Amino acid sequence: LPQLPRPRSTRTFVVANQKGGVGKTTTTVNLAAALALGGLRVLVVDLDPQGNASTALGVDHHAGVAGTYEVLLEGDRVEEHVVASPEAPNLHVLPATIDLAGAEIELVSVVARETRLKKALAAYRETHPLDYVLLDCPPSLGLLTLNALVAADEILIPIQCEYYALEGVSQLMRTIDMVKGQLNDDLELSTIVLTMFDGRTRLASQVADEVRGHFRTQTLPTVIPRSVRIAEAPSYGQTVLSYQPTSVGAIAYLNAARDIARRGVEGGH
Ligand code: ADP
Ligand code: MG
């Protein structure tokens, strides 16, 4: 695979959309694998108690496995619990287990509760240089997502090409503005990925046009098609890139990763 350009400094993306099932996790894991296969050093932080990103990257996350919970709540170091993904060289995962479900409540009483992840990642990067960090969020705007919004410098919003696609995005934009003003000045909505695009329906094209109208510069030229291969891959503990490397879904994620990597370098990241 062609090598991708290395950013000048680490780019940390929060993959957010408080709607569930829009393709956050699928986009996180496949972009992460595509960037790593392009020769870049990538870390995925699984912030969803469901642990779907851990599953798709072939990383064990049964109850009792230490990961994101211990880093956020117990002050453990990221390097103690990071696991190499079999999906690509230089791709690591901080896994999430069901324990993380309690973190949303437990974090409320913790000191500096919004900045725990940011500090942990900064300490990790001192000894483990990274090109990309992707933070996979749960479908809510609670303290886990807030930690990710504070730790990141770029926001990636996956938008599903169907009715009400933009519903919820305005609420997310208000949250982003609040975080930007109070907790993270650097945060920027840099990337929108159109997912589950069904080229046979006029609605999908209309939605894609509407999103491009609202977010002209942010929306990636590459669109991710609806594809059975993409949906099947996690049940084999794989990304679509290793499960069906020549499928349209795999190629779309490789192209989307290339779009992101090139833009980053041109855009001065
Ligand atoms: P989220 O993390 O936002 O909840 P997921 O990434 O888990 O969303 O995706 C929701 C469901 O849609 C999953 O079953 C996933 O396999 C499926 N899916 C995601 N992207 C695609 C796609 N491009 N084509 C077909 N199915 C997809
Ligand atoms: Mg998810």
Image: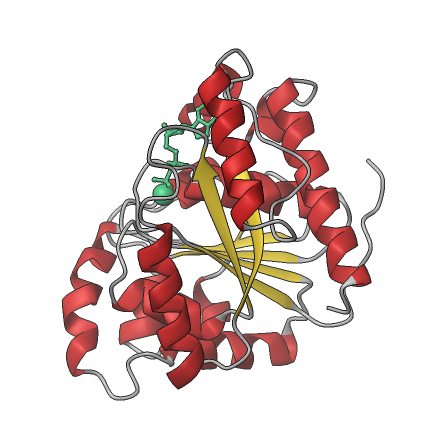
Please, which residue is most extreme toward the top here?
200
Quadrant where the C terminus sits is bottom right
Q: In the picture provided, is 219 more to the left or to the right than 233?
A: right
Please, which residue is most extreme toward the bottom here?
111
The answer to whether residue 98 is seen in the rendering is yes
Residue 82 in the image, given as x and y percentages of width and height = 49, 60
Q: In the picture provided, is 234 more to the left or to the right than 47?
A: right
Q: Residue 62 is drawn in which quadrant?
A: top left
Residue 179 in the image, given as x and y percentages of width and height = 38, 76
Q: Residue sitting at 81 percent across and 61 percent down? A: 266
Residue 211 in the image, given as x and y percentages of width and height = 51, 41
Q: Compared to 126, does 172 lie above or below?
A: above
Q: Residue sitting at 52 percent across and 11 percent down? A: 200
Q: Compared to 123, does 8 lie above or below?
A: above
Q: In the picture provided, is 265 more to the left or to the right than 251?
A: right
Q: Residue sitting at 28 percent across and 76 percent down? A: 74
Between 12 and 165, the one lying in front of the other is: 165
Q: Residue sitting at 56 percent across and 23 percent down? A: 225
Count every numbered label the image shows and give the total: 0
Q: Residue 55 is drawn in which quadrant?
A: top left
Quadrant where the N terminus sits is top right
Please, which residue is most extreme toward the right here?
2
The answer to whether residue 86 is seen in the rendering is no
Between 20 and 206, the one lying in front of the other is: 206
Q: Quadrant of ligand 1?
A: top left
Q: Compared to 23, does 196 lie above or below?
A: above
Residue 15 in the image, given as x and y percentages of width and height = 46, 53
Q: Compared to 127, does 1 lie above or below?
A: above
Indicate the colouring scheme: secondary structure
